[in-house]
């Protein structure tokens, strides 16, 4: 039965690909292939899902994330006037809503609003973004505490939208397993292209209207997220009993704990956390040095935006390389080489901080283009297989919750990395105007980036196109599938059947 079903799904996907195959060759084929790819995804998953991915990943996280990053950097440096180590800590505080992604995931899975599990949360995310960004842009002298609260609220809006669209991606990955890499590629490509456009123009807007004006513009991506909640195609859950919500929260916790107890699940999760946590982030120290007029290259706001846009080009190249060349390689092999190259890429920062590039006759703006593009491309090559692996670890019925848990583990790692980097900058006395020990921070960061290679044995080596879930959970899913419609799987039945093993 399972093989027949998989064959049917595979044949459906192949038919869709054949129907949407471009009939021309050469340059027309090159131009039309992305269009037919979008058309195929829209046909298989529904156009509103593709629109949601583009709005959340492309506009909100890509374009909006670029504006938010550059605007927040200059807001902390020029408006609030904090030290780089402090800014590093504050960036971690702003990211806290991403640490509680399982909460948003549980809400989207077990607490429908007016009969819908996804749409209301997109609306809530959009409203949070609009209100918080308006407050930051319109208030003249906002205290640092309230500024952090507003930035955190805006981050919460983006996080809620992210976990909700991730639930949709994970659900569609289970329904169309052969399209899972394509859906992750759509997410990565949307984010990279949006980031490229955003970073290209963000520095110009910061220069023209200031950081607070940029925050005002960020109400537009938040409004688009709200529109996703109004347009998303989602079946109505009739006769939902809200009295069962408390029990379903307990059941969700049981389901996640039951799944995490399997070595095939917790071992990759542990690797994901450590690979991020050990790669300490000293970006704020580098940013302050980039813009310093004495010890650094004194890049302008427009140049900073251009540098980040080059990084988006690198991310885009990484996504294209993964989609077209690397997606069928085993997870362990990809993660080994990407982690190794990620550590070695730190040498480029060291060369620039020691001003060795000038001794070789390479101008700062040329070398930073090479540095940023290479680093971001390798970072995305490391990130994409982790995303695909995470989507394949999600049991049916709690896709949003469990994918959010996995992404939360990653974000706890990123928070540890950010705060660890802030502590490192503080211990080495890297300040707004003092960068004597920045080179040492870069060396220590590079060493720590390579250290996760000792833990690569935690990652499964299997075929990335096959399921990596333990057979016990797969057996549970088969029984659950036969009992209920695939689009409306009850969490309770999943948990009960797992507990009954």
Image (tube, grey):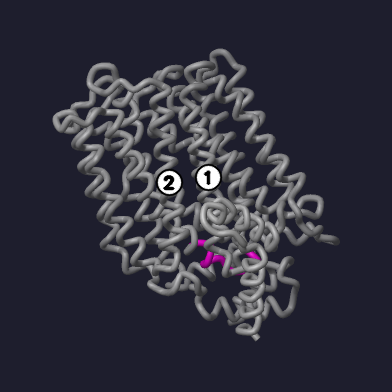
Left or right placement of residue 163 versus residue 358 in this view: right
Q: Which residue sits furthest right?
A: 239
Residue 266 is tagged as none
Residue drawn where x is 66% and y is 29% of the image? 131
Measured as percent of width and height from the top left, residue 132 is found at 62, 29
Task: Give the position of the C terminus as an image quadrant.
Answer: bottom right
Residue 238, located in which quarter of the rendered image?
bottom right
Residue drawn where x is 56% and y is 51% of the image? 31
Badge 2 crowding class, 10 Å Cα cut-off, few under 14, some 14 to 19, many 20 or more, is many
Measured as percent of width and height from the top left, residue 443 is found at 20, 42
Q: Which residue sits furthest left?
A: 359
Where disc 2 sits, the SS reads helix
Where disc 1 sits, the SS reads helix
Q: Main secondary structure of the magenta part?
A: loop
| In magenta stretch: residue 392 | yes
Measured as percent of width and height from the top left, residue 500 is found at 61, 80
Nearer to us in this view, 290 or 418: 290
Measured as percent of width and height from the top left, residue 401 is found at 60, 58
Left or right placement of residue 456 versus residue 213 in this view: left
**What segment carries the magenta color?**
390-398
Nearer to us in this view, 436 or 363: 363
Badge 1 or badge 2: first in the primary sequence: 1
* Residues at marks 1 and 2 touching, judged by CB atoms closer than 8 Å: yes
Q: Is residue 102 visible?
A: no
| In magenta stretch: residue 403 | no
Label 2: which residue? 315
Residue 241, located in which quarter of the rendered image?
bottom right
Residue drawn where x is 35% and y is 61% of the image? 335
**How many numbered marks are there?**
2
Label 1: which residue? 191
């Amino acid at each position: 039965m399972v093989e027949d079903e998989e064959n049917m799904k595979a044949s459906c996907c192949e038919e869709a690909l054949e129907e949407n195959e471009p009939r021309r060759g050469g340059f027309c084929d090159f131009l039309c292939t992305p269009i037919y790819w979008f058309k195929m995804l829209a046909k298989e998953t529904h156009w509103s899902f593709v629109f949601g991915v583009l709005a959340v990943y492309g506009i909100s996280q890509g374009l909006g994330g670029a504006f938010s990053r550059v605007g927040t950097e200059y807001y902390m440096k020029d408006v609030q006037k904090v030290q780089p180590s402090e800014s590093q800590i504050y960036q971690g505080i702003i990211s806290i809503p991403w640490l509680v992604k399982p909460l948003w995931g549980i809400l989207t899975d077990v607490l429908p609003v007016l009969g819908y599990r996804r749409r209301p949360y997109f609306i809530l995310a959009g409203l949070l973004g609009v209100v918080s960004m308006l407050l930051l842009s319109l208030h003249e002298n906002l205290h640092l505490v309230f500024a952090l609260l507003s930035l955190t609220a805006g981050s919460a809006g983006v996080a809620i939208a992210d976990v909700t669209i991730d639930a949709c991606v994970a659900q569609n990955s289970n329904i169309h397993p052969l399209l899972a890499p394509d859906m992750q590629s759509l997410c990565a490509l949307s984010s990279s292209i949006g980031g490229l456009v955003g970073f290209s123009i963000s520095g110009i807007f910061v220069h023209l209207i200031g950081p607070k004006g940029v925050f005002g513009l960020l109400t537009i991506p938040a409004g688009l997220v709200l529109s996703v909640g109004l347009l998303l195609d989602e079946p109505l859950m009739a006769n939902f009993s809200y009295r069962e919500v408390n029990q379903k929260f307990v059941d969700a916790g049981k389901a996640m704990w039951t799944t995490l107890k399997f070595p095939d699940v917790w071992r990759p999760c542990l690797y994901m956390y450590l690979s991020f946590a050990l790669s300490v982030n000293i970006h704020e120290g580098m940013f302050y040095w980039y813009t310093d007029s004495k010890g650094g290259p004194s890049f302008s706001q427009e140049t900073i935006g251009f540098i980040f846009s080059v990084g988006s080009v690198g991310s885009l190249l990484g996504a294209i390389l993964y989609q077209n060349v690397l997606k069928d390689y085993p997870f362990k092999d990809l993660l080994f080489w990407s982690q190794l190259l990620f550590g070695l890429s730190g040498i480029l920062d060291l060369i620039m901080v020691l001003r060795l590039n000038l001794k070789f006759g390479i101008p700062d703006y040329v070398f930073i283009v090479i540095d940023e593009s290479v680093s971001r491309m390798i970072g995305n090559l490391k990130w994409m297989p982790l995303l695909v692996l995470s989507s394949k670890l999600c049991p049916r019925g709690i896709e949003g919750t469990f994918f959010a848990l996995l992404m939360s583990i990653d974000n706890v790692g990123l928070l540890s990395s950010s705060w660890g980097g802030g502590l490192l900058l503080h211990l080495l006395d890297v300040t707004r105007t003092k960068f004597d020990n920045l080179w040492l921070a870069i060396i220590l960061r590079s060493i720590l980036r390579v250290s996760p290679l000792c833990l690569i044995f935690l990652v499964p080596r299997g075929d990335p196109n096959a399921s990596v879930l333990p057979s016990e959970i797969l057996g549970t899913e088969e029984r659950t599938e036969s009992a209920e419609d695939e689009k409306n799987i009850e969490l309770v039945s999943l948990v009960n059947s797992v507990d009954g093993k």
